[in-house]
Image (cartoon, rainbow, N blue to C red):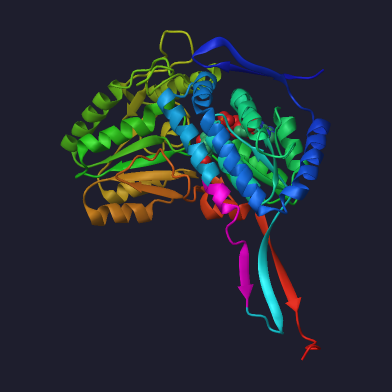
Amino acid sequence: MSRVITSTSPQKPSDVVLETPALTAPEVAAAVLRARAAQKGWGENAMARAAALRGCAEGLRARSAEMAALITREVGKPIVEAKGEVARAIAILDYNAQAAIDPIGTVIPPTTPGYLMAVREPYGVAGLITPWNFPIAIPVWKAAPALAVGNAVVMKPSGMAIGVAKLIEEIFAQSLPKDLFQVLVGGAECGQAIIEFADVISFTGSSEVGAQIVAQAAKCGKPVQAEMGGQNPAIVLPDADLALTVAHLSNASMSYAGQKCTATSRIIVVGDDARYKEVTDALVAGVEKLSPNDPATEGVLVGPVISDSARADVENAAKGAVARGGKVLIGGAPVDRDGWFYSPTLIADLGPEDQLNQEETFGPIAGVIRAKSVGEAIDSANSVRFGLTGSVHGRDLEATIRVAQSLKTGMVKVNAPTAGLDFHAPVGGTKDSSYGEREQGKEGLAFYSFIRTITLGAGSRRFE
Ligand code: NAD
């Protein structure tokens, strides 16, 4: 019996966005075969690839309002951020359209007459497995470089973002050859079949699933990259500009209900009792302004979390923290309305080793931790198994540099929020947050190709 995947709106769970059967492993195998056939011509013509990717950008630009509204409806992203995500996806397509005609290798001095070259070649079919929280930016930041360097793409979106994925497929189909980019809807069986049949694998999602994907891909001998969870610290130094820092931190921890891999989950305050009180009072005042509401309303920054089980996770994290001695500074309860809303929550008085400050909850909840010195703050920040991103806030140049250089994270922000990435710079983490090559920018392009070394011999000299 075939399984059905159903996507519903988190702010109005009775609103079914899309319902579609889950693909089986043999259906995935057939889709990969079709993609492989489509890739042949595509891999040979860089000019055509650049033009087609520009066409995808144009197609998305023309339907950007529709796409943003669908993102808000399907995953509850505040409309202002949904519009920003669509704009980013367009920028990524433009960047990669241009990258399709970048140089693809190097010429190396040969040891014998002729030429010695190292040239980048596409693998064939890229298999992408994506999460729900950036339902267009992440699919596009994987698919665009994969296509630009000459691969076909099969992509399994999260079951909670299949409506957006199918709209991407529809828009891309206007500009790309048939079967070159296919969205394969399904559950774990579909994802595992993609790993088995595709040639290069890129995953974004939780660290638990990511570890399984990496192990399976390695067993099949496939190149794999995985971007996973975070437990991102923000260190507030004694001389930080309070108004600016609080604006950054309340937004980075709570906007989109804290459901960004780069959200701030721990706020580490350096200083004496008076400074700690000043910072926490200002944080509470900042978070208070972010009351949850319908994400389709302009100006709203906090909507629902993605599902009832995600809300239960936030609730359990808050209750557990309180049971272990945590003090709720603000929030700490579900919002009484239709949809999966939870009030933005700050919890203080727990040490860096507490579960709340160690694991990723993926919701509107953050721990506030005290540190007596900058060194203690750095140790606290680095005491987790994750290493995606971190931020430091302060005016003392030497202290900010020291912190920036000491955080064991793949990305560091100084006087800027942890949340937010540039579309043309490498993205990725350390420890359990990341595996394999970086995404985006030149590194992202490199991942989807292998290097072939070519020797052109001219040793006979028979024309001389
Ligand atoms: P998830 O791990 O539950 O799912 C991710 C994808 O994997 C989905 O498509 C899912 O259907 C698929 N999947 C699940 N089990 C599978 C299996 N056994 N085999 C094959 N595929 C399987 O993650 P999610 O809830 O969609 O997303 C939230 C998580 O993603 C958070 O942990 C967040 O931090 C992380 N994330 C990381 C980044 C980053 O760049 N580091 C960006 C966004 C989200």
Does residue 97 appear left or right of residue 397 in this picture?
right
What are the residue bounds of the magenta stretch?
95-108
Task: Point out residue 284 in the picture as x, y percentages from the top left corner.
Answer: 26, 25
Give 273 or 131, whichever is nearer the viewer: 131
Residue drawn 56% across and 29% down?
Answer: 132
Does residue 9 appear left or right of residue 5 in this picture?
left
Q: Indicate the quadrant where residue 292 lies.
A: top left
Residue drawn 39% across and 48% down?
Answer: 412
Task: Point out residue 396 in the picture as x, y percentages from the top left corner.
Answer: 21, 52
Give 376 or 91, whichever is nearer the viewer: 91
In the image, residue 259 sits, relative to residue 196, either above or below, namely above
Q: Is residue 270 magenta?
A: no
Give 191 or 137, whichever is nearer the viewer: 137
Does residue 335 appear left or right of residue 269 in this picture?
right
In the image, residue 231 sits, relative to residue 403, either above or below, namely above
Q: Is residue 100 magenta?
A: yes
Name the outermost residue toward the bottom: 464
Q: Indicate the quadrant where residue 346 lies.
A: top left
Task: Point out residue 327 in the picture as x, y percentages from the top left corner.
Answer: 32, 24
Does residue 15 appear left or right of residue 169 in this picture?
left
Residue drawn 49% across and 12% down?
Answer: 339
Work out whether residue 276 can be spotted.
no
Task: Point out residue 416 in the picture as x, y percentages from the top left corner.
Answer: 32, 42
Please identify the quadrant where the N terminus is shown. top right
Residue drawn 76% across and 37% down?
Answer: 193
The quadrant where ligand 1 appears is top right
